[in-house]
Image: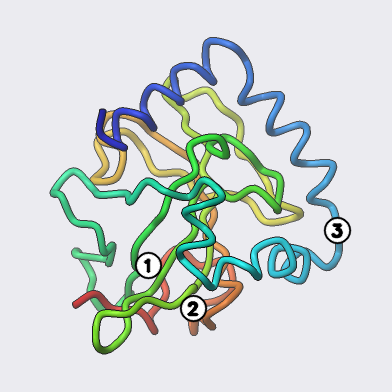
């Protein structure tokens, strides 16, 4: 089963069971910390090692509908990129700052990768999920018909906790990242 199908199946399951609303409510309480970036860094510090991240469940490499695994803004390249998203399907729908859905690794010179940030993802297969928040940061909505989850709309928030983004800590794209 492809990762996109796993994400879509998770979205349907969250919608049907109401688990998405439960995860949102549970995550909101824990995300209220004024030191959110520090909390996220502390929870993810060991994942500078991609091997450690894979061992702990971030073992699905995401690819978009075009088969690209290194994600960058193909419409406006000057916006930058994101890099490689390693998914932990158990964390999809979570707004707990310690449980991102994806860890993002930026490509480096010679093919190595470096830990850059994370993405929190709440699927919205029915278009009725209210905007989630991580602390006071609202998620960005991507409607159905997108290159990431195809027919499934979703809410997402990127946190560039390990690589500075000139566009901001919570920006979707990081102008300092580009794909080979």
Percent of width and height locating residue 105: 41, 69
Report crowding for label 1: few under 14, some 14 to 19, many 20 or more residues within 10 A (C-alpha): many
The C terminus appears in which quarter of the rendering?
Answer: bottom left
Residue occupying image coordinates x 61% and y 25%: 20
Callout 3–callout 2 Cβ contact below 8 Å = no
Between 125 and 111, the one lying in front of the other is: 111
Badge 1 or badge 2: first in the primary sequence? 1
User: On the image, numbered disc 2 is attached to which residue?
Assistant: 167
Left or right of 171, for residue 169: right
Residue occupying image coordinates x 52% and y 23%: 128
- Can you name the residue that lies furthest to the left here? 66
Between 121 and 133, the one lying in front of the other is: 121
Q: Secondary structure at mark 1?
A: strand
The N terminus appears in which quarter of the rendering?
Answer: top left
Percent of width and height locating residue 137: 67, 56
Between 111 and 33, the one lying in front of the other is: 111
Percent of width and height locating residue 100: 59, 50
Residue occupying image coordinates x 38% and y 34%: 153
Q: For the residues carrying marks 3 and 2, which lies nearer the camera in this image?
A: 3
C-alpha distance separating marks 1 and 2: 12 Å
Report the disc number at residue 33.
3
Q: Secondary structure at mark 2?
A: loop
Q: Secondary structure at mark 3?
A: loop
Badge 3 or badge 2: first in the primary sequence? 3
User: On the image, numbered disc 1 is attached to which residue?
Assistant: 82
Q: Is residue 150 above or below residue 173?
A: above
Q: Is residue 58 above or below residue 161?
A: above
Report the disc number at residue 31.
none
Badge 1 or badge 3: first in the primary sequence? 3
């Amino acid at each position: 089963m492809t990762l996109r199908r796993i994400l879509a199946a998770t979205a349907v399951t969250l919608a049907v069971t109401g688990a998405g609303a439960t995860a949102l409510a549970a995550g909101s309480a824990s995300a209220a910390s004024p030191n959110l970036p520090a909390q996220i860094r502390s929870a993810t510090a060991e994942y500078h090692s991609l091997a450690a991240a894979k061992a702990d469940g971030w073992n699905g490499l995401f690819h978009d509908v075009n088969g690209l695994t290194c994600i960058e803004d193909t419409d406006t390249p000057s916006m930058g990129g994101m890099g490689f998203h390693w998914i932990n399907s158990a964390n999809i729908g979570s707004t707990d700052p310690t449980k991102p859905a994806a860890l993002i690794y930026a490509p480096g010179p010679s093919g190595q990768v470096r830990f850059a940030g994370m993405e929190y993802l709440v699927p919205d297969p029915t278009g009725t999920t209210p905007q989630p928040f991580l602390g006071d940061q609202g998620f960005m909505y991507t409607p159905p018909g997108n290159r990431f989850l195809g027919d499934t709309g979703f809410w997402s928030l990127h946190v560039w906790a390990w690589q500075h983004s000139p566009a901001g800590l919570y920006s979707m794209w990081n102008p300092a990242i580009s794909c080979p």
